[in-house]
Image (cartoon, rainbow, N blue to C red):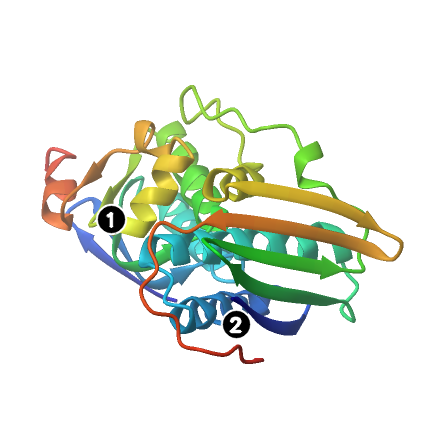
Amino acid sequence: MQIRNHAVFAARLDNTPRIREFVRRCCARLAIGEDDCFALMLAADEACTNIVEHGYQTDAAGEISLQFEVDGEAARMTITDTGRPFDPASAPPPDLGGSARERPVGGIGIHLIHASMDEVHYHAEPRGNRLVLVKKLQGRAHARPGGESN
Amino acid sequence: MDINVDHRGDVAVVAVVGSIDATSAPRLSTVMTEQIQAGKVKLVGDLSGVDYTSSAGLRALLASVKDSRSSGGDLRLAGIQKNVHKVLEMSGFTSILKSFPDVEQAVASFGG
């Protein structure tokens, strides 16, 4: 059974707590375990922060759409926006070795998306971007029946 | 996110409560920078009240550890919760930041 939840957020940094809360509530409804839920919240936060900071930049009128689905044993988040094209896979991986002094301040967000998700797919759309993040679920108890919109 | 600074000898304990993300991390950076500029270069970040950090929090911590070390001090962490530890580990930060189970041990590590 596929269960789907959907929400739209104004593309502002101060909406990141709401985005995490939306993901947390989806996980609770769908009986997704704590570790998987944390990974999904983190990936959604990093992806949406990138969209606000790099995709929309100063465009305060932008929106971020987040669709959360569970199909079988995987959770899938589809994040769409109409900002500038930005493929997370195109960013160079950060250097995670070496001392603190050598470590660049930044570039870690995209690494965290890849490290916490099993699949990351980027699609350039005619009017923006679509990012699909997939997490294979470790353990799921008994999901409440029926989807629900935020 | 709430931040409280407590001075124990020459060590500044910066206690953070809540979630650190792109909205709140700049405030943490500001507080850390104020301490370092005031000569308090031995810093303990008490994270026992932090249940979440994104990469924005890591950037704030990394900038503070660089600044404090270049001034002859250090930033050491205390009371890291499971999920925050996971993010530090995924980013390779556990090898560059010293961490301790609690504030007392982190303060004592500076050698009084």
* Amino acid marked by disc 1: Ile
Distance, label 2 to label 1, CA atoms, is: 24 Å
**Percent x, y for residue B15?**
27, 58
SS at circle 2: helix
The residue tagged 1 is B80
Mark 2 surroundings: few (<14), some (14-19) or many (≥20) residues within 10 A: few
Of residues A118 and A64, the one nearer the viewer is A118
- Judged from this view, the residue extending furthest toward the top is A98
Task: Tell me which residue sits at (33%, 54%) in the image.
Answer: A139
Of residues A107 and A3, the one nearer the viewer is A3
Q: For the C terminus of chain A, which image quadrant?
A: bottom right
Task: Tell me which residue sits at (37%, 33%) in the image.
Answer: B93
SS at circle 1: loop
Q: Which mark is residue B52?
A: none
Compared across the picture, whether B55 is left or right of B89 comes to right
Mark yes or no: residue B31 visible. no
Q: Is residue B45 above or below residue A56?
A: above
- Judged from this view, the residue extending furthest toward the front is A1
How many discs appear? 2
The residue tagged 2 is A18
**Percent x, y for residue A97?**
43, 21
**Percent x, y for residue A15?**
58, 70
Q: Chain of mark 1?
A: B
